[in-house]
Image: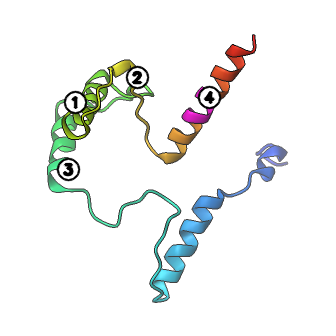
Amino acid sequence: MKLIAARMERIKPSPSLMATARVQELRAAGRDIVGLTSGEPDFDTPPHIVEAAYAAMKAGKTRYTVVDGTPELKRAICDKFERENGLIFAPDEITAGNGGKQGVVKSLTAGICVAMSQNT
């Protein structure tokens, strides 16, 4: 008797993860490859970020947050855009995500929702 539903067998591996694995294989074989498959940087996390994360965890900030970013993060993003780019946004105009795929899905979903609301 199978313990996993049959529909689980229809799940295919992520094409982007498969491409990332192929880039790693080619690099291991000595090929000079520029991987454009995932947003993984080619450098270690800078020490000041590691220290800030460590301090936050020591302060008890170890729980899940709201999906689109904490108020503090959104405020910091607004401040960065104003300081470095001369752009002014309100925190309710900012959404943060944990990766590119999440950002693309949010963007496409927002566009679909706007289009649907205009058709009703």
**Label 1: few (<14), some (14–19) or many (≥20) C-alpha neighbours in 10 Å:** some
- Secondary structure at badge 3 equals helix
Where residue 63 sits: x, y (%)? Answer: 34, 29
Magenta residues, dominant SS class? helix
Q: CA distance from mark 4 to mark 1?
A: 26 Å
Q: CA distance from mark 3 to mark 4?
A: 36 Å
Identify the residue position indicated by label 2 in the image: 93
Q: Which mark is residue 79?
A: 1
Q: Residue at x 75, y 15 (%)?
A: 119
Residue toward you, 58 or 73: 73
Q: Residue at x 55, y 41 (%)?
A: 104
Amino acid type indicated by mark 1: Asp
Q: Residue at x 77, y 47 (%)?
A: 8
Q: Which residues are magenta?
A: 106-110
Foreground mark, 3 or 1, reads 1
Q: Which numbered disc, 4 or 1, marks the residue that appears first in the sequence? A: 1
Q: Which numbered disc, 3 or 1, marks the residue that appears first in the sequence? A: 3
- Secondary structure at badge 2 equals helix
* Residue ranking furthest to the bottom: 30
Amino acid type indicated by mark 2: Glu
Q: Which numbered disc, 1 or 2, marks the residue that appears first in the sequence? A: 1
Where residue 110 sits: x, y (%)? Answer: 59, 27
Amino acid type indicated by mark 4: Gly
Foreground mark, 2 or 3, reads 2
Q: CA distance from mark 2 to mark 3?
A: 28 Å
